[in-house]
Amino acid sequence: MSYSDPSLAMQKGTLSLMKAGATGVQTGGRIYDGVPGGAVKPYVSFGPFQMLPEHGDCLDGGEAFLTLDGWAAGPDTVQVKKLGAAIASDLDRASLVVDGQRLIELSVEQIQYMRDPDGITAHAVVTVHAWTEPVAVASGAPVNTAPPVTGTEP
């Protein structure tokens, strides 16, 4: 069995969870894959996405690390800390359907808050950790009960 990279489906799913949750409220729905010029703060952008395939007998799942960046007007960090908390609230232990994969676990691994060198931007870096396995080998009741995420734009 070959590895099926679920990264795009995971991005679509996390985007959907954040837009429908506290992150969408905090940002007014401004959650981007590619940040447009002149984007209004606060907003969230997708950062690095690392996929680590796990190969075994009859199992080709994987581990993923997704980085989300929260951006807010500073120099204080009050708004960006609220944004980081919203991202964590939306994604930590969330139920997420990933096409062709069963999400075993989705958890927030860490949140970092900082001031950017420009002196006027506050920045949150949220690292989300996920484990997946192919649906075909999943045993027992599925963890995910949410409907599949559809659409082509993350």
Image (spheres, rainbow, N blue to C red):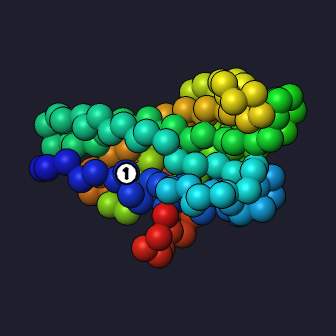
Whether residue 122 sits left or right of residue 104 in the image: it is: right
Query: What residue is at 73 percent from the left and 56 percent from the top?
Result: 40
Query: What residue is at 45 percent from the left and 48 percent from the top?
Result: 103
| Quarter holding residue 29 | bottom right
Q: Residue furthest front?
A: 118
Query: What residue is at 57 percent from the left and 60 percent from the top?
Result: 36
Q: Is residue 11 visible?
A: yes
Whether residue 29 sits left or right of residue 137 in the image: it is: right
> Of 91 and 114, which appears nearest the observer?
114
SS assignment at label 1: helix
In the rendered image, the vertical position of residue 44 relative to residue 116, given as above or below: below
Question: Residue 72, how many percent across, how many down?
Answer: 76, 42
Query: What residue is at 57 percent from the left and 27 percent from the top?
Result: 109
Question: Residue 6, how many percent across, how many down?
Answer: 34, 53
**Residue highlighted by disc 1:** 7
Q: Residues within 10 Å of mark 1 (few under 14, many from 20)?
A: some
